[in-house]
Amino acid sequence: MWTSPQALAAILGMALVSFAVKALGLLLANRLPRHGFAAAWLRHVPGAVLASLVAPALATGNPAELLAALATALMYWRSRSLILSMATGVLAVYVARLALAG
Amino acid sequence: MQTSPPSTHGFADQFFAGARACIPVVLSVAAYGMVWGVLARGAGLTPLEVLMMSGLVFAGSAQFVALDLWTARPATLPIGPLILAALIINLRYLLITATLRPLFRPDQTWKGALMMGIVSDETWAMTMLEMQRGRGTIAFLLGGGVLAYVCWLLTTLLGYMAGSAIADPATYGLDFAFTATFLVLLFGMWKGKADLLPWAVAALSAIVAAHVVPGTWYVLIGGIAGSLAGAIADTVRHVD
């Protein structure tokens, strides 16, 4: 079976709301003043969103993630390379989980 | 803030620069794509539904939640809850695409709005980093976006076809790729001590929210709380 009318409706609906939210963010931002408080607020959004994306994944209560985050930070500080730091983080969390589990 | 992209770079140059810069973050997209494909097969999606979901919805976290609600029998498919869940999970994009405003001239607003469909967390973050360094163009955003889009489509299909032959990514620490990537991107955005307060407020609010509220509300809550804290601090210090 290829698909069903119900599945098609669900997927198209999901696609529509996902696109609408993304488009609306830019459209609303264009109505904000380009100076003063609104501009300052918008300038701080990227860092705040990134910090919010990362923080709960680190505060799991499991030290493996914190150790791996530290290793990632050290590698980034030394190398300034995104891919090297990412690989270090993945390797560190793998090793730390093995070590802490065993 | 720049209001128009520099004209010294051609569209194609910037497009490929964006795609190249996004290769590391797209690796993390690929890992998630494979996992989603494996789970989609288990949830009973058909190959065409996998293709349509990845190609039209193109939102990782919303697609993961959809699998929890999905039923193989069309008669029991919760269409309303699926759409509502996608809306709620993607609300964080209101903040994310808002920050891309400096890329577009005021007369390019509607053209820009149409392009926002291809924005994902990963390629947005790379573009923000580029913008903070005084570069960053529409073509850069699109280059990364197209690469991530194609990669998401291919890896979700690949995961679907390979099925459970692919192991759980947590086994190899691959689930940490996302966290490590965004952590590094956050470091890259550091401009000085003024960032400390908004980032700390964002992180703490997000941690508390993640414990209290289900879903991905914590991104929106932390993002709003942190950025407001930063703006208030700037206003108090009279910086603009």
Image (cartoon, coloured by chain):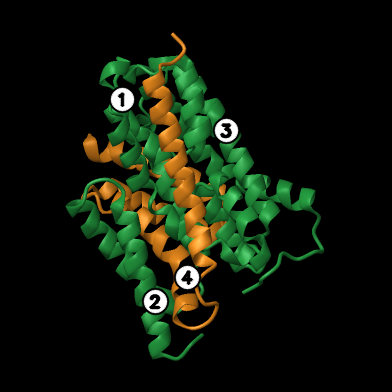
Chain colours: A orange, B green
x, y percent for residue A49: 41, 60
- Taking the spot 57% from the left edge, 39% from the top edge, the residue there is B148
Both marks 4 and 3 on one chain: no
Residue at far top of view: A1
Q: Quadrant of the N terminus of chain B?
A: bottom right
Q: Viewer-nearest of labels 3 and 1?
A: 1
For badge 3, the amino acid type reads Cys
- Taking the spot 38% from the left edge, 52% from the top edge, the residue there is B91
The residue under label 1 is: B70
Both marks 2 and 4 on one chain: no
- Taking the spot 39% from the left edge, 32% from the top edge, the residue there is B172
Report how far apart the C-alphas of labels 4 and 3 lie in the structure.
30 Å
The residue under label 3 is: B151
For badge 1, the amino acid type reads Trp
Chain at numbered mark 3: B
**Would you say residue B216 is visible in this rendering?**
yes
- Taking the spot 47% from the left edge, 70% from the top edge, the residue there is A42
Chain at numbered mark 4: A
For badge 4, the amino acid type reads Leu
Q: Nearer the viewer, residue B63 or B127?
A: B63
Res. B60 image quadrant? top left
- Secondary-structure class at tag 1: loop
Chain at numbered mark 2: B
The residue under label 2 is: B230
Report how far apart the C-alphas of labels 1 and 2 lie in the structure.
40 Å
The residue under label 4 is: A42
Circles 1 and 2 in contact, beta carbons < 8 Å: no
Crowdedness near tag 3: few (<14), some (14–19) or many (≥20) residues, C-alpha within 10 Å = some
